[in-house]
Amino acid sequence: MKAEDTPFTGLFEGPKQFIVPVFQRDYSWGTKHCLQMWKDIIRAGSNEHVKAHFIGSIVYVAAAETSATITRWLVIDGQQRLTTVTLLLAALRDRLPDGQGEEETATEDDLPTREALEDYYLCNRHGRGDRRYKLHLRRADQDTLTATLDGGATPKVASERITENLAFFKNQLADADLDVVYRGIKKLVAVDVCLTRGQDDPQMIFESLNSTGLDLTQADLIRNFVLMRQDEERQTQLYHGYWQPIESAFGARYRTDFDKFVRDHLTLQLKPSKQLRSDEIYQRFRGYFFDTVKDDQVEDVLSALRRFGGFYIAYSLGQETDAKLAEPFRRLRLLVEVASPVVLRLYDCYSRAKTLTRAEFIQAVELVESYVFRRSVCGMQTRSLGQIFATLAYRIKEDSPLLSLKVALYRQGKKRRFPTDAEFREALEMRDLYDMRHCHYLLDRLENHSKEVIDTSSFTIEHVMPQNDDLRPDWKAMLGKDWESVRETWLHRLGNLTLTAYNTEYSDRRFAEKKKIKGGFNDSPLRLNKFIREQTQWTAAEMEKRGKDLAAKALVIWRPLDVDAEAVKTAELEDRKAQAARYSLDKLDFEKSRPLFDALREQVLALGDDVIELCGPNSVTYRVFDFFLEVIPRKRRLSLLLNLDFGECDDPTQRVKDTSEWAFVVHASESGGALFNVDDKTQLAAAMHVVRQAYEKVSE
């Protein structure tokens, strides 16, 4: 690598071409950047004491394909500065009259002719085709720059940034001293960093120059990392085949949403124990790439990004074209922002693996919707939802996606559990729901759980019994002598809440008026208001009845978790096997009890072909589905923890102890009701008598 300070204009001199690789982002500087550069140039050009103005670094490496007449360089860093100065020079060229500056006494800081300026800094005199231009950009950027340099018509698909910035510089030059401008341009200095092809690592240098992360998204860094490692032809092939379609599919939301997608995609690939931070996505992607991907697998990585990117766009960006899927997607997005890892995993099973039908896909998404909403209504913890959904996504199996999702939801643990019907019903009937974040969603779903959908997006929540602290006398009379207690109890509960487009008109009118006025409950087309229309009064009894009816309907809409018990046991056993794989019998501390254990082990394994032995850090467990025996080595004996209640254990020797007598059993990983200590081989027969009872119990 060679790095040295050089006049910025010197970079353009001679027959050469700087090429912005196809994978790099488009030219993105706005007029505010141009204005700052303009001010710097004018200040430098008008002050003879300013010898130079530093403008940053330009990093480039020789292109694989070049020629003896025109040297071609791939720009690693510096596209924005190179393009902006080129636009200013193009605008300055157009302000110069032909022939100016040709006097013999002219110095290098005098204004050149229009032709000379173009020859020095903008075009290669002997270049043909694309090689005519000293700077070659991407796509619409290049088409617009070409039209600018050649004086041609602006292309139909033009670069907005180049067009705007060129117009800005032309406007600034209209009243400027061109000599001052040119002197200022000549004083621009850059760090000229020329890399040696095959020796220097362009990506490493690019990262160090952009370590602050300013302007560059995590997606920019990932794209450059993957494509910069390839030769120019391969870069172009991979960019057009994979990355450009992803960019195009995201459209205007590429800059804002692609990083979020990559985080979710990496979550599925890496299965981190904690949710990935937005500022560590690129570094984690690098680690994933180096640890699991070979250079010849780059296409596989980009193919997966493209496929999952399509899933993300369909779900998270609301662009699903299948109406049957789009509606449950929409409802889930209303409830939670971080469910996409689960949906992406399900979508892959549905679209690629074909192990999930559309009906099952919808059922799975609605199950997640029910899980989130039930927990919200029940006031259960909603923190760490990102990690909850990531963990659920890891546990979805490709060969049985819906079943494995159900099992995963069931095995969430007490703090993350799926609320029961009883809990959900009680919360719906008894909780104040008005201030709940998803109150409108609740009422809309209760209304529109039907083929005949009414758009309630413009409707507001209405309290049938008014919120006004100073209730009208007729309301007090209707509610009875305990009206204050009734109002405090029932005001914000489900039975008193509905939707209407006439909230202002209803105000705190009498109940009879709310029914009869124009747009009142009697005129309402909402099914949600049918019960209200049929009542002659509105008291605690009516509110309670309506609340119970709506809660019963909610149990049908937001269904409970129904999962096969055997599937849950199988999943638990698989997890235990995976944990046991980390340990071995040889690492257990038997001391002098190993011969005794070997004799016992032979008889336990002989109980049946379904006996599974799992070794842990301090004990050995024997299971069918449930555990029936845990053997805990001691110095000179074995402690046998049995899956039996002490009272149901048949033990003629009376050696069995009730574990409830101790706060815990040392080194035990299971919870059993009976404990049998074996001191020598003469006690094995008695031990096996109770072990067989435990085995038969779990085998029933």
Image (spheres, rainbow, N blue to C red):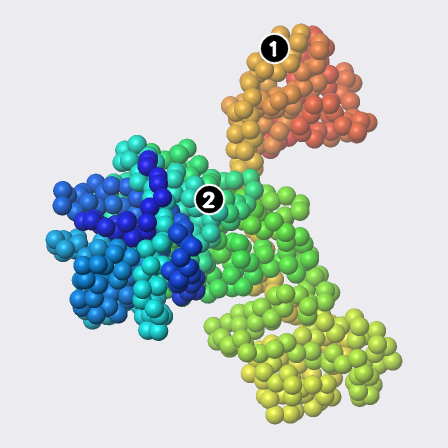
Camera-side residue: 70 or 516? Answer: 70
Marks 2/1 in contact by CB < 8 Å: the verdict is no
Q: How many marks?
A: 2
Residue 211's tag is: 2
Would you identify the image quadrant in which residue 47 lies?
bottom left
Camera-side residue: 293 or 654? Answer: 293
| Residue 297 visible in the current orientation | no
- Residue at 16% x, 47% y is 70
- Residue at 73% x, 65% y is 430
Estimate the x, y position of residue 16 in percent, counting from the top left.
Answer: 21, 48
Estimate the x, y position of residue 642 in percent, counting from the top left.
Answer: 69, 25
Estimate the x, y position of residue 339 in percent, counting from the top left.
Answer: 52, 54
Camera-side residue: 113 or 238? Answer: 113
Quarter of the picture containing the N terminus is: top left
* Tag 1: amino acid: Ala
Quarter of the picture containing the C terminus is: top right
First reached walking from the N terminus: tag 2 or tag 1 = 2
Residue 196's tag is: none
Looking at the image, residue 589 sits to the left or right of residue 186; the answer is right
Would you identify the image quadrant in which residue 372 lies?
bottom right
Residue 599's tag is: 1
- Residue at 36% x, 54% y is 187
Camera-side residue: 15 or 53? Answer: 53
Picture layout, residue 59 above or below residue 594: below
Picture layout, residue 415 above or below residue 37: above
Estimate the x, y position of residue 235 in percent, counting from the top left.
Answer: 27, 45
| Residue 180 visible in the current orientation | yes
Disc 2 is placed on an element classified as: loop
* Tag 2: amino acid: Ser
